[in-house]
Structures are given as C-alpha cells and as structure tokens.
Image (cartoon, rainbow, N blue to C red):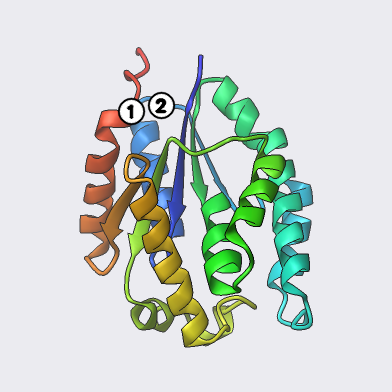
Amino acid sequence: MSGLFITFEGPEGGGKSTQARRLAAFLEAQGYEVVLTREPGGTAISDQIRRVLLDHTNRAMHPRTEVLLFQASRAQHVEELIRPALAQGRIVLCDRFADSTLAYQGYGRGEDVEELRALIAYATGGLQPDVTLWLDLPVEAGLARIRPDHRDRLDAETLAFHRRVREGYARLAEADPQRWVRIDATAPADDVQQAIRAALQPHLPPRAAG
C-alpha cells in the first residue's frame, strides 16, 4: 500500500499554508487519512533547523550553509515523517519541499542546480512528489500580503531575488508538466481551493470505506 505525496510550491504570499490546511480538512471529510506538514520543519529536529534558517540575525549565513541546513532538515523530515506516512497509505500534504531548494537557492541564489539536485537526492533518498501544486502570483502582489512583522530572513530578500525565484518555478514546471499544476493564486481563496481540488481529482485513490 502506498500513499499520495502532494506538495505546495510557489512565491511568498501565495497562500500555500492556508490552502494546504483547507485541502487537508476537505480530504479528511472525504474519508482519507491525511498528514499535513511543512518545510523547513515537520519534526522536532527539523523545526530546530528551521529556526536557524529563518532567523533575521543570521544574515551572514553563506548560501552553501543555507543549502546544507535545508537538506539536513529535509532528510530528517523524510525519514521520520513522510516515508512512514506514505507507507501507511496516507495522503501527505507538504507546504514546500525539494523544489523550493531549486527555486530559491538554485535560481534565486545562483547555486549550481545540478549540484543541488544531487544533494536533494541524497537527503530525500530519491523521494519525489506525485503532484506539485504551484500557487503562482506576481512577486509584488505576494510580498504585499505578508505583514512586515511576519517576514522572515528569506521574505526580506530583494525584489530581484524573488523574481528569479518565480522564474525558477516557471522553468521547473515547464520541465516536468506531468507533475506540476499551476494554480492562479491571485484568484479569491475559494476559487483557488476549487482549482486545487479539481486538479487533484484524477490522482486521488478510491475513498476509504465507511
């Protein structure tokens, strides 16, 4: 028995966390067993690394340090939470996953994408999502949705950085259209949720009995 691994990706302010929570509630109401998680984080160890990664005081962090910390958090997340849940036949919804590394550290920071792919493969043991929902919107619109006191170290990067990230997502989606689904995140939240449910319908396993 194997579960379904769904990831949410996209620029800042796209509503990934909100839409993931709404989808989890919908699927549970349909009788599915759902695990809702996020990156960086998802386990006690991974959450400790998350605090280091997003702390504003760590402005001196080198891009390679950033990459390796993300992979350390991800490795623990995959082995402790995601793989066991999938093995139990559950649907795993993850707010960001490995594609964020390619978009942010690869296209955003300019790190070598193929080197990043090798690190990601090691950290995840080759695990890839079944479906990736790309909640896309213009950079300025997304950042405007984030309250200044809620911005983390990566949110505070330049507009140019965030534009490179968005372009990175576009390239990743273009290269793997069978896995990626673009969702217009500028639409009202209810419309976004309906688009997500429609996109996932062909991928969902038969509903649990009872």
Circle 1 SS class? loop
Q: Is residue 195 left or right of residue 22?
A: left
Q: Residues within 10 Å of mark 2 (few under 14, many from 20)?
A: many
Q: Is residue 70 left or right of residue 194?
A: right
Q: Identity of the amino acid at label 2? A: Tyr
| Residue sitting at x 30%, y 55% | 182
Residue 165 placed where, x, y %?
48, 70
| Image vertical order of residue 203 relative to residue 144, above or below | above
Which label sits on residue 204? Answer: 1
Q: Is residue 55 left or right of residue 27?
A: right
Residue to which mark 2 is pinned? 32
| Residue sitting at x 23%, y 49% | 195
Q: Residues within 10 Å of mark 1 (few under 14, many from 20)?
A: some
| Residue sitting at x 22%, y 41% | 198
Residue 192 placed where, x, y %?
26, 56
Cβ atoms at labels 2 and 1 below 8 Å apart: yes
Q: Confirm whether residue 109 shows in the render.
A: yes
Q: Is residue 139 left or right of residue 198?
A: right
